Image: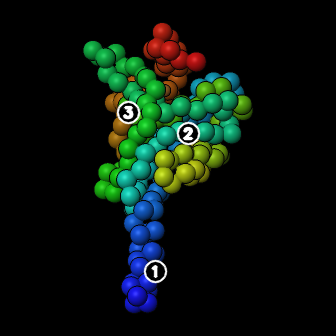
Amino acid sequence: MRILLFAVLGLLPAIALADSTDIQVQHAWSRAMPAGATGVVYLTVTDGGAPDTLTGVASQVAASAEVHETIDDNGVMKMRPAANLPVAPGKPLTLAPGGYHIMLLGLKHALVAGTSFPVTLTFAKAGAVTTSATVQAAGAAMPGMDHGSMGGTDHGNMGNMDMHGMSMGGSGSK
Ligand SMILES: [Cu+2]
C-alpha cells in the first residue's frame, strides 16, 4: 500500500507538466500611427506544451483590440474578426501582413516609430501573456522579410484604414 502511494505521488509532477502550456509570443511589431487612428500589431506565437487557443487581445494604448483576418474576396482584400485561433507545438500562429493581425481600435496616443508598447494576449490554458510590440515606421513591411508586394493590403495608410471601415460595416461590428 505504501509503495502504491509513493508511485502515485511520483506521477503528479509529470501530469502537471504534460497539462501545462509553454506559450511564447515573439517578434511583435506595429506601425507608427497618430492618436485616435487604428493601429495594427503583428507577431508570432509558438507553443512548446499542450495545444492552446488564443481567445483575446488587449493593449493599454487602445480603447479596444481585436484579432482580425484579412481575406481575399474575389480580389478585394477585406477584414473580419477572427476568434479562438489555435496554436500547437510545431504549428506556430503567425500574425503577419496579409493575414491575421491584431487591430488596435481608438489609439489613446500616437504610436511613435522606435518606441514600444505592451500587448496582452489571452489563451484558454496559458492565460494572459504580455509581450512588447516595437513600432516601425509607417508603411513598414515585415522586418527582415520580403512582403513588399503585400504592402497595399492592410493598414499602412489612410486609404487602407478606409477599407477597414467599409469591410467591417454591416458585419455586426460594435
Ligand atoms: Cu483589421
Choose the circle earlier in sequence order: 3 or 2.
2
Ligand 1 has an atom within 8 Å of the beta carbon of the residue at disc 3 = no
Residue designated by label 2: 57
Residue designated by label 3: 99
Q: Quadrant of residue 36?
A: top right
* Crowding at mark 1 (Cα within 10 Å: few <14, some 14-19, many 20+): few
Choose the circle earlier in sequence order: 1 or 3.
1
Q: Amino acid at mark 3?
A: Gly
Ligand 1 has an atom within 8 Å of the beta carbon of the residue at disc 2 = no
**Residue 115 pos. (x, y %):** 65, 46
Determine the residue positioned at 41% across, 54% down. Answer: 46
Q: Is residue 112 visible?
A: no
**Residue 151 pos. (x, y %):** 41, 29
Look at the numbered discs 3 and 2 and tell me whether their residues touch, using CB distance below 8 Å. no
Please name whichever residue, 114 or 126, is drawn nearer the observer in this view of the structure: 126
Q: Is residue 75 above or below residue 130?
A: above
* Crowding at mark 2 (Cα within 10 Å: few <14, some 14-19, many 20+): many
Q: Is residue 145 above or below residue 47?
A: above
Determine the residue positioned at 37% across, 20% down. Answer: 77
Ligand 1 has an atom within 8 Å of the beta carbon of the residue at disc 1 = no
- Which quarter of the image is occupied by the N terminus? bottom left
Determine the residue positioned at 47% across, 57% down. Answer: 24
- Mark nearer the viewer, 1 or 2: 1
Picture mark count: 3
